[in-house]
Image: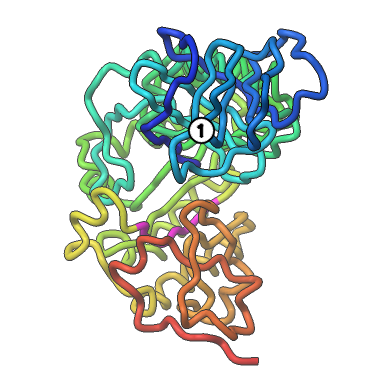
């Protein structure tokens, strides 16, 4: 997911608004804004006067000649902005946040930080606070996003906790971005309520998939990983309800010390009982949040689960299930699994290590999470031609 890239230090040069606002970045003032969307002019070089009509003005360098309201000097070292990006300006706190980057392929909408699971390896631990304001901001953000965007994520927390609000969000995406694929991350439990699953299906979004974690074929093991009693049963009912409603479903399995041994058994369970799912992703561990906290308990070197992983992939592939390996560099996988490995790590947290220099497979390999420096597989090494 793309983070909300924020920085303090936004400095007003003229009369400033009292409330936060959103705007889409424009780099040149070749034409006057038509007012259809709020536009913010990005001023890279000093100018004697600024053209009127923009919602706000962001200057890379201070100016002594400011003739318009809501002109601000950008914080030093802030991520470079570009045409089509969407930002939130908070005059009262001096904060600037980039909510959408047009050039990124990893944009996501964080709809809530609340969650009804408490997963042992959650990379973004849930917070119990009222963030209902996020929905209204996202509804305002979506019309500002470029319709050329290929894919957007919906993430949390647990998006389905929004209930009817989630349906409003998906409807807004269908209306304003009909050509943009939407991938929603959910634990699936709230979709055990048939009304919510049916409501999502009735929206008939042209390209929506819900990614739902399933960590074991055994209820007690899944519930332990997500730290929620009864979650397994609710998750399975949610998957069934979504598929009945015509919604595409992806199963996601994060591999760690509590999940790797029974990967073949889980694969058989999926092949026998959930053959109708649209995709299965077997995923390496991201060492952030609770995964970092629980690292001594969760860590297992990918070299040490190659055989159960290979068996699981074979079972799923032979059953005709579309299967991918996420977050696994090629050098820690047996060569027969390389065709299943995908470049899955978001651009803003994707790195390659020094060992990757000169590797014959680097172009095809998805690399590493930046957090992987905390604990590295002993198998990391360049593959020579």
Q: Is residue 298 left or right of residue 89?
A: left
Label 1: state its secondary structure.
strand
Residue 343 versus residue 24 in the image, above or below: below
Q: Badge 1: how crowded within 10 Å, few (<14), some, or many (20+)?
A: many
Q: Is residue 283 left or right of residue 47?
A: left
Q: Is residue 159 left or right of residue 147?
A: left
Residue 317 place in picture, x, y as percent: 60, 63
* Residue 298 sits inside the magenta stretch: no
Residue 332 versus residue 367 in the image, above or below: below
Residues 216 and 55: in front is 55
Q: Magenta residues, as a range?
A: 280-286
- The quadrant holding residue 119 is top left
- The answer to whether residue 127 is seen in the rendering is yes
Residue highlighted by disc 1: 98
Residue 30 versus residue 34 in the image, above or below: below
Residues 290 and 94: in front is 94
Residue 375 place in picture, x, y as percent: 29, 70
Give the residue at x 44% y 58%.
283
């Amino acid at each position: 997911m793309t983070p909300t890239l924020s920085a303090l230090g936004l400095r007003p040069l003229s009369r400033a608004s009292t409330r936060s606002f959103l705007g889409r970045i424009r780099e040149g003032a070749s034409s006057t804004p038509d007012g259809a969307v709020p536009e913010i002019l990005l001023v890279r070089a000093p100018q004697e006067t600024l053209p009127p009509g923009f919602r706000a003005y962001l200057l890379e360098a201070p100016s002594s000649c400011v003739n318009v309201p809501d002109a601000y000097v950008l914080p030093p070292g802030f991520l470079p902005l570009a045409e089509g990006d969407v930002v939130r300006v908070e005059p009262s706190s001096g904060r600037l946040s980039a909510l959408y980057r047009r050039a990124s392929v990893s944009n996501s909408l964080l709809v809530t930080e609340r969650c009804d699971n408490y997963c042992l390896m959650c990379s973004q631990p849930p917070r119990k606070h009222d963030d209902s304001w996020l929905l209204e901001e996202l509804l305002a953000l979506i019309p500002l996003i470029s319709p050329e965007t290929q894919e957007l994520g919906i993430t949390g927390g647990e998006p389905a906790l929004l209930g009817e609000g989630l349906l409003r969000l998906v409807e807004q995406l269908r209306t304003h971005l009909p050509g943009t694929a939407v991938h929603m991350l959910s634990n699936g439990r709230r979709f055990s309520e048939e009304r919510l699953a049916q409501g999502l299906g009735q929206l008939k979004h042209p390209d929506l998939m819900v990614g739902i974690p399933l960590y074991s074929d055994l209820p007690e093991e899944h519930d332990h990983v997500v730290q929620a009693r009864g979650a397994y049963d609710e998750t399975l009912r949610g998957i069934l309800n979504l598929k009945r409603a015509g919604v595409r479903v992806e199963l996601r399995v994060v591999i760690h010390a509590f999940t790797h041994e029974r990967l073949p058994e889980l694969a058989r369970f999926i092949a026998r009982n959930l053959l109708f799912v649209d995709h299965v992703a077997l995923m390496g561990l991201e060492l952030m949040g609770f995964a970092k906290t629980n690292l001594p308990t969760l860590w297992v070197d990918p070299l040490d689960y190659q055989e159960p992983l290979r068996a699981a992939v074979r079972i799923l592939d032979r059953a005709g299930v579309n299967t991918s390996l996420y977050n696994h560099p090629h050098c820690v996988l047996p060569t027969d699994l390389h065709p299943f490995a995908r470049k899955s790590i978001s651009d803003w947290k994707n790195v390659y290590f020094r060992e990757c220099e000169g590797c014959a497979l680097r172009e095809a390999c998805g690399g590493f999470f930046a957090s992987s420096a905390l604990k590295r597989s002993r198998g990391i090494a360049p593959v020579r031609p």
